[in-house]
Every structure is written in C-alpha cells, then in structure tokens.
Image (tube, rainbow, N blue to C red):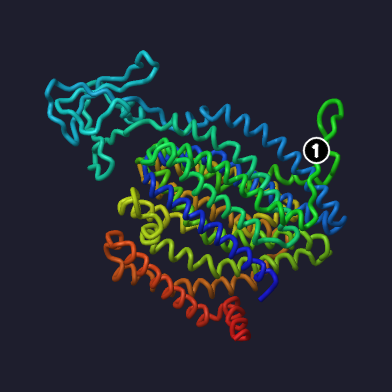
Amino acid sequence: MSSMQKKSLIATAAIFCCRFTGLLREIVYTSLFGATGALDAFLTAFRVPNMLRDMFAEGALSQSFTSVMSKVEKQEGVQAAWGLANRVSAQLISLMICIVSAGILLAGVFMQQLYPERARVVLHTPWGAPTMLCADAAYRGTRTNADGMKEVLFEATEKIEGLTADSCLRLSVVEKLEHGQKIALTCAAENVPAGVTRIEPRSFMALATDLCRIIWPFILLASVSALCMGALNVFGVFGLPNLASAAFNLTTVGVGALIGWFIDPAFGPDALYGFAVAVVCGGAAQVLVQLPKLRQKGYRLHWDIGLRWTGKWFSFTDPAARRVWMLMLPGVIAAGITQTNIFINTAFALYLQPGSVTALSSAFHLWQLPVALFGVAVGMVVLPTVSRMTLTAGGEAGQEISLHLAKALRFVALFAVPSAVFLSIWGTEIVSVFYQRGRFDAAASEFTGNVLAAYSAGLLAYAGMKVLQPVFLALEKPWAPAGLAVVAFCISVGCNYTFVHILGMPAMYLALTTSIVTTLNFVFYFLYLRHLLGSMSCRVLVPGVLRIAGAGALLALGCYLVHLFCFDSFTDWGFIARFGALALGGVGGAVLYGIGCVLFRVPEMQAIVSRVLRRG
C-alpha cells in the first residue's frame, strides 16, 4: 500500500467522524422540525454563508494556501512558511470582517431574492358555512392592506380547515388567474390531491432573514479554520483538521438543542434561533480544536497585514501571499461550481412543494458522505505532494504527476462506484434509516430517496473532481477550469428553469442537474490536465477503472434483486427492522463487491488483501 493510500485512509477515518456527526446534526434537524417550511427557512438562511465557505474558505483559499505554503516550506524553510501563514491570516480576517458586515446588512435583500413573493389568503364565506378540508374558491384579485402587506382574495361557500390569519400563497400561483376563476384550495400538510393548491401556514421569509443575520459571522470563523487546516496539511497532519468539523457538528447540535429548548420547549419555528446561534459557536469550536497542534508545529501568532499603501492602492509586501490570492480568485469560480449549483437549486426549490429544500439538503449530505470520505481525503493528500513534485521532478514532472493522479483516481473509484450503487438503488431505504423519525415521515423518506438517487448519478464524477481540482492550483493553472465554471453555471440555470418552470418537475430533477454539471466538469478537468501534463497515464487508469466497474455491475444486480424481493414496504417497518435489514444488506453487498473485485483482479483490492494477509 502506497504512502498516498495510507495518508488517504487516515484522512478518510477523520472525515468519517466529521460526516457521521454531520448526519447526526441533520437527523436532529429533521426529527425536531420535519420537512417543513420552518426548516426550509433555516437551511436557506444557512445556505448563503455556507456557500461562501465552501467556495471561498474551504475550497479555493484553503487549496491555494496549501499549494503555495508547501512550496515556500520546501524552498525557504519552516519559519518562512509560518510567516506566510501570519500574513495571509491577517489579510483574511480583515476581508472577512467586511464581508460579514455586508452580509448582515444585506440579509433581507438575499432572502427577498431567494423567496418567491407571498401574500396572505383572505377567504370570504357566508355566515355559518361548513368547514371543509378542501374547498373551491373564486379568485377576486389582490390588494395591499394598511400595514403594507399583500393579500390575495377568494370567495367560497365553505370554510377551509386550518386557515389562519398568517396563511399565505405564492403570488406566482394566482398571477395567471382571471377574476372569478375558481381554484381548489386546502391547508392540508400532506396527501394533497392532484389539481388542488396547498395554502402554506405562514411566510417564513422574515424568519429566514433573522436567522441569516445571526449565522453570518460563521463565515469568518470557518475561513480561519480552513486556513488552519491548510497549514496542518502542509506538515502532513490530515486527521485533526477534519475532526475539527466534527467539533462543529457536535457543538451545533448540543448548543442548538439547549438554546432552542430554552426559547421554545415544543421546538416550534422560534427554536431555530437557538440553532442559528449554535452555528456560530460551532465555527469557534473548529478553530479552537486546531490551535494546540498549530503551536506544536511551530506556529506563533503575529499580526502582519502584509500590505503597504503606495499612494493610489495597496500592494503586497510578500510575493507568496500575493500568489495565494491570485490563485484563489479563479479558484473561487472553479471550486465553487457545485456549491453554486446547490445555491441555485435552493432558489428553485422554494417554488416547489414545501419540504423540497429540506429534501435536497438531507440527500446532499448523504451524497457527500462517500465523496468526502474518499474524494476529498485523496485530494487533500494529493495537493501538497503534487505541489512539491512541480519543484523537484524537473522535466519528468508531467509523467510523475500523471501517474500519481491515475493511481489516486483509481483508488477513489474503488470506493465511489459501490457508494453510487448503494445510494441509487437503496436511496429510499438509506434515507428512511437515517432520517425517518419524529416529524420526518415515510412520505418524506420516499421523496428524499428519489432526490438521493438523482444525486448518485454524479457521485463518481464529483469524487474525481475533488482529486483533480487541487492539481490546477499546484500547477498554477486555475483560469481554464474557471472559464468552464461559467459555462456550467449557465447550463445549471437553464436546466433548473426548464425542469421547474416549464415542465413542472419535482426536486429530484434539481439534483439531476447537479449530477449533469458535475460530470461535465470532471470530463473537462481530465482532458485539460491531460493537455497540460502530456498524459494522464490512461494505460494505468482505464484498465483498473473498468475492472472496478465490472465489480460494481455485479453489486448493482445483487442490490436490485434485494430491493425488489426483500425491501417491499420498507418505510412502514419499525426502526430496528429497517436498521437490521439495511445493515445485513450492506454487509452482504460489501462481501459481494469484494468478491467481484477479486474475480476482476482489481489491483487496489489485491494490495489491501495482501497487506491484511501479511499482518495475519
């Protein structure tokens, strides 16, 4: 087993703890609040700063910093590397203070752009009219009341059960109606018949705005944490930085539940204020966990902004710090394409049935688990290694790097292929075991499972992207991927608009858009790196991947047969039965996949088996 594989497995173990606690956090959210408009508001509020964290802090900045710091440490020594860390961190904190301030001030604008405009429903009925679950109402237009709030007016012969003064409709629902036209309305939360329009219990835009303002400081803390992670990666520390994310998840759950209970013991929508405060506390925990290890490696805090005023503008005093930011700028676009697409999905999902944002978020966390365990872990190990190869390999750098990447991609495919099979065929079953409890019911499990299956189509490409993406920074060639990101952004918007506003498709098609865009990105990254390096060692990569695909096909057949004959009415089973059946199926699937890898002679599996036999 190579050094790269050993370090990757260490990072994988740490990331598993991070992702497992992340799933625990999502389970707490869905159990307490369900797939509802209130939780949609919280996730939407968190989406804006979290997207910036993924694009800026934990994506482009962390990778750019790791690449440059690796070269500085190799050429100039440890003290020069820590000097660079001080300058970049001072510049980062200064920038983040400005961004956080702007985010808090503009939170209302962000939410207004994301949330479709809603109006309160006013239903006029005769005195003594019966109360019905569903009623036919005649549209009488819209108006603005004395408080400046928009109202949509209906007349009906029956009252609607559950209608309150806060009940509302999206204006887009009624804007095409003619005066006097009848429409079927209901306030039911589930089992809404086709052709019936659901009235929402309230507009959560104000709640989302408040939560967004509270959460914004998290981006500053997360950015500092990402910088700490990059510095530790340079010195071969991969486990602790990922465990710091586990500290964030546990703090968010514990502090959020405590403050939320204090605000509202019944955990109504107002309890989400507690979880918003807990997000900021979790960001602080991420930083504090890494500080002792940084000191052990020689870091000493020293504020050095690394900028000087030239009379017209600021200039960098350290060329290395300037290189970090210059690499980062195009990297923000390239590294953030998937996160940008998720943000777009959130905006479009708000036009779909309530709970769509929650379904996309819950499915995405399950989808990211194998990607983070293997794609992110391997990419994290590859970056500093490739950065040093560009300095030491001379004219043979391209060949050495391409061989290193081919082995890395093959190692990732070994785990990504079975993960994609499990998530696509057993999506509903997996969602049911992880999330189906409390207010998250069987219908929500099936809905989210379909979204997860659509995400899984792009899992292998996404994992491969995480390996290849940092290499452009190591080679200091980030602009070409950034150009494709703009094209992919347009494709994403076009697909989402077509699926939602033209074809009226559900949330799973938004996830399918993510898979399409991710696959296109991976293909471009691979082809462009092949151009830059002169080769991608396809003679090493392709046969290994085809062998893995053969084992994956055998696994897919087994999983489909189990799903067809053994998992009927799975979501109606008790939790113990569901957990036991899925665990047994997972173990059986892993054994079947292992047998397939041996039969198809997958090199990575043979290396793992040989190492285990030697130890035995």
Residue that badge 1 annotates:
305
Instruction: Point out residue 253 in the picture as x, y percentages from the top left corner.
Output: 49, 49
Is 181 drawn above or below residue 288 in the view shown?
above
Q: Quadrant of the N terminus?
A: bottom right
Is residue 517 or residue 530 the one in the foreground? 517
Query: Badge 1, how many Cα within 10 Å: few under 14, some, many 20+?
Result: some
Q: Secondary structure at mark 1?
A: loop
Instruction: Point out residue 443 in the picture as x, y percentages from the top left corner.
Output: 30, 51
- Indicate left or right for 99 with 298 as reference: left
Instruction: Point out residue 131 in the picture as x, y percentages from the top left corner.
Output: 15, 31
Instruction: Point out residue 248 in the picture as x, y percentages from the top left corner.
Output: 57, 50
Q: Label 1 sits on what residue type?
A: Ile
Is residue 25 or residue 383 the one in the foreground? 25
Is 472 drawn above or below residue 553 in the view shown?
above
Q: Quadrant of the C terminus?
A: bottom right
* Residue 559 in sight here: yes
Q: Name the residue at 49% across, 44% down.
A: 256
Q: Name the residue at 27% across, 65% down.
A: 568
> Which of the 4 image quarters holds residue 269?
top left
* Residue 502 in sight here: no
- Indicate left or right for 508 with 50 as reference: left
Is 59 drawn above or below residue 156 in the view shown?
below
Name of the residue lying farthest toward the front: 262
Q: Name the residue at 31% across, 29% down.
A: 167
Q: How many marks?
A: 1
Q: Name the residue at 73% across, 46% down.
A: 327
